[in-house]
Image: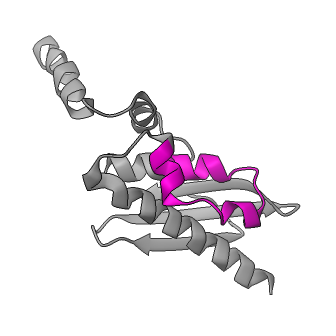
Amino acid sequence: MIENENMVDPIQNSTLEGISEKLKSELLNPQNIGKMDFPDSYARVTGVCGDTIEMYLSVKDGKIKNIKFWTNGCGATIACSSYVTRMSKGKSIENAFKIKPKDIDNYFEGLPDEHKHCAKLAVITLKAVLKEYARKQL
């Protein structure tokens, strides 16, 4: 058993090679994962890659009180979803709408090219849950 445990570190290190410390940290310690009972808003979006993100939102006094996500996606989709939910918490709906995929890419000091679409999917899902919340307010 010890022999297999010694194999994990080199595999993990080679997988994480060449990505920023911020991206590594978000991949290894994602935040806001889970589903929410009785959210004020919910959205589900499937990207062209096949990854699906679900987002749950609760709002109090015009600000995002809580936001969670669930995904069947890759590590980059998890990291981007985690970061976008962290960025959104405490913001007004209007300010959360201003979050762009470029903000995620910049924070992670450049996502690998094959995962840039993950930032877009996270933002598209965020905007979908925000739009659904706004629609319910009418």
Residue at the image position 80 percent from the left and 87 percent from the top: 138
Residue 96 x/y as whole percent: 68, 61
Q: Which of 60 and 115 is in front in this view?
A: 115
Q: In this view, does 111 lie to the left or right of 97?
A: left
Residue 81 x/y as whole percent: 49, 53
Residue 78 x/y as whole percent: 41, 49
Residue at the image position 43 percent from the left and 45 percent from the top: 79
Q: Which of 131 and 9 is in front in this view?
A: 131
- Which quadrant of the structure image shows residue 19? top left
32 drawn magenta: no
Q: Is residue 72 visible?
A: no
Residue at the image position 35 percent from the left and 71 percent from the top: 47
Residue 82 x/y as whole percent: 51, 47
Q: Is residue 134 above or below residue 39?
A: below
Q: Is residue 119 above or below residue 126?
A: above
Residue at the limit of the structure toward the bottom, as seen here: 138
Q: In this view, does 31 lie to the left or right of 50?
A: right
Q: Is residue 108 left or right of residue 6?
A: right
Q: Is residue 4 visible?
A: yes
For the magenta stretch, what is the residue range? 82-106
- Which quadrant of the structure image shows residue 60? bottom right
Q: Is residue 55 left or right of residue 109?
A: right
| Main secondary structure of the magenta stretch | helix
User: How is this picture coloured?
Assistant: one colour
